[in-house]
Image: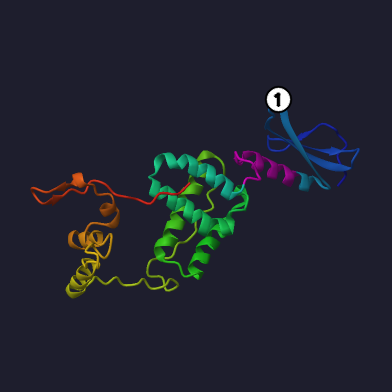
Amino acid sequence: MSKATSQKPRQDKGDGSIRFNQKSGKWEARYVYGRLPNGKPDRRSKYAKTEGEAKKFLREMRKEADTPQPNVSRTITVDEHFQKWLKVRKLRIVENTHVLYRSLMEHHIAPYIGTVPLINVTSDHCQSVIHSLIDQGYSHGLIKQTHTLLGTYFKSAMIKGDIVRSPMLGVACPGQKNELLPKPKEMRPLTTNECRALIDQLGKQSPSGGPLYRLGAAPILMLCTGIRIGEALALKWTDVDWENKVLHIQRNYTLAEVK
């Protein structure tokens, strides 16, 4: 088969063109990817030894041009991008959730994929995070929280256009009864005798006549009413209805992140 000698570009299936470059002795595949910021056509070329190889290059260039490109820098890492995402996310979540997200990233995600460029993260990277938590014996609850956070974060990045596809697609989270997970510790409530012994101990007086335990009344109150520690710590004297002997639970004390 003789080589073509014409310099006129040959159209291949309507998009782009291929031609034989006599000066270089190679086939050239040319394709216009769109427009540059200055308005000029973004023309790109690839060279091949044979016409068949040039056609293959042209097909690849078409596919590449049709594939959405990330909006973020190719060097921004997962940790850097996550911190920006969390700053915006904080506007829509409560403080406790914000603290939880920061903790999960710092202790359970960043050590494995924090330094990986965002656009390079794969499903294998994300699955390795889950497997690492399993290997370290973490509870099903923490693993599920991490899995959910990763899914929410990468989905948001995909919707925003910072990545083309969420790497969490197909990443498995173990079920609560999975044999690889440690067996959850069974909770045992205090018996009646244990409750009485605890109340007696907390109610003891010091040699000076005051309470032996400065905050001993708090656990007694929680034990007798069933309120949680945050609710007990948030109580004010105005919450007590002395006449009707009623305690109004209206607030909850939470531990916020220390700046």
Q: Which residues are magenta?
A: 55-76
Residue 150 visible to an observer of this rendering: no
Residue 129 visible to an observer of this rendering: yes
Q: Is residue 74 left or right of residue 198?
A: right
Quadrant for residue 30, please give it.
top right
The local crowd at label 1, few if under 14, some if 14 to 19, many if 20 or more residues have their Cα within 10 Å, is: few
Residue toward you, 81 or 96: 96
As for residue 70 lying within the magenta part, the answer is: yes
Residue toward you, 100 or 155: 100
In the displayed image of the protein, which residue is found farthest to the top?
39
In the displayed image of the protein, which residue is found farthest to the front?
208
Residue picked out by circle 1: 38
Residue 121, relative to residue 47: is it above or below?
below
Residue 259, relative to residue 175: is it above or below?
above
Q: Is residue 213 left or right of residue 171?
A: left
As for residue 214 lying within the magenta part, the answer is: no
Quadrant for residue 23, please give it.
top right
Residue toward you, 218 or 8: 218
Query: Residue 176 at x, y = what percent?
Result: 38, 66
Residue 21, relative to residue 240: is it above or below?
above
Say which residue appears at 77% left-offset and 35% top-offset.
10
* Colouring style: rainbow
**What's the amino acid at mark 1?**
Asn
Residue toward you, 257 or 104: 257
Query: Residue 131 at x, y = what percent?
Result: 51, 66
In the displayed image of the protein, which residue is found farthest to the left?
244
Q: Is residue 185 left or right of residue 148?
A: left
Say which residue appears at 24% left-offset and 68% top-offset.
207
Query: Residue 244 at x, y = what percent?
Result: 8, 49
Say which residue appears at 28% left-offset and 60% top-offset.
214
Say which residue appears at 49% left-offset and 41% top-offset.
87
Query: Residue 14 at x, y = what percent?
Result: 68, 34
